[in-house]
Image (spheres, coloured by chain):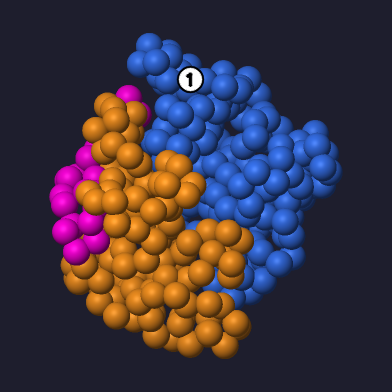
Chain colours: A orange, B blue
């Protein structure tokens, strides 16, 4: 199990990139819009893991709702696992609340699930299936 | 630059360990009390980085104040850098607010600084000096 990325909800990608890309000097591997999730996303390399900046593109984006409620900050962490189904079975047996995905395919073409923060010390945790042949660029973000 | 750890504020270390250690099966490398910072800390290995669970030991702990204001969740992320002083000079020149540490030695014996969330997309960012001879076990936590 490894940390795939840390997802950070921001009001302005450009503003956040000034810090993470220009000042901290992290390499930005791409900026893209994901219409299905109503976000613009910037990915930055941080050692063996990544930072994902998420800017809403509409007021009904899950990220817009998060910003309204909590302000800017960390939205979720994403853990890459081998054998997602076995993990989900073990998690459900342990009473962990699985709130989205449950092994479906997300926008990035990878199977994923989201675990409820109440089960994870207040942290929204995404599990994304590891795929050694095509490294995950980003994971699905169906949940807010 | 690499992610040293993700710090998560929790009300109960035991409860959070049930998820992170027992259910997710992350290896816990130690639990310790840090009286100077009024926290109990559990460290868990997550691939090439770590999760730091922080439980307050008193009502005047910075973590207790965070929990009161925000509830459980991610408190900070810590980035390991080589050449902390050069980083701090560049950050200050770029207008980043440095709120604690500024290169002082933290509880773990490592030099550190905390950057204000308003400069970092809502995220409290710690910088900790990399020390290849004695890998950082945990960094100072002067700021809440």
User: Quarter-wise, where is residue A2 in the image?
Assistant: bottom left
**Quadrant of the rendering where the C terminus of chain A is positioned:** bottom left
Report whether B5 appears left or right of A55: right
**Quadrant of the rendering where the N terminus of chain A is positioned:** bottom left
Image coordinates for residue B120, horizontal then vertical, percent = 42, 32
Q: Residue at 34% of width from left, 29% of height from top?
A: A19
Viewer-closest of A59 and A52: A59
Q: Residue at 34% of width from left, 58% of height from top?
A: A62
Viewer-closest of B88 and A56: A56
Q: Is mark 1 on a helix, strand or loop?
A: loop
Viewer-closest of B106 and B114: B114
Report whether B50 appears left or right of B64: left
Q: Which residue bears the numbered disc 1? A: B97
Is B143 a magenta residue?
no
> Extreme front residue here?
A59
User: Quarter-wise, where is residue A118 in the image?
Assistant: bottom right
**In the image, which residues are magenta?**
A23-43
Is A26 a magenta residue?
yes
């Amino acid at each position: 199990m490894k940390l795939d990325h840390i997802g950070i909800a921001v009001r302005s990608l450009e503003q956040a990139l000034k810090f993470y890309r220009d000042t901290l000097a992290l390499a930005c591997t791409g900026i893209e819009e994901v219409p299905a999730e109503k976000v613009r996303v910037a990915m930055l390399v941080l050692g063996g893991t990544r930072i994902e900046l998420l800017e809403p593109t509409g007021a009904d984006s899950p990220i817009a709702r998060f910003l309204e409620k909590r302000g800017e900050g960390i939205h979720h962490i994403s853990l890459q696992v081998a054998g997602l189904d076995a993990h989900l079975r073990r998690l459900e047996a342990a009473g962990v609340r699985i709130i989205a995905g449950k092994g479906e395919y997300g926008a990035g073409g990878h199977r994923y699930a989201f675990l409820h923060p109440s089960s994870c010390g207040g942290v929204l945790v995404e599990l994304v299936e590891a795929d050694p042949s095509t490294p995950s660029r980003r994971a699905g973000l169906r949940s807010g």
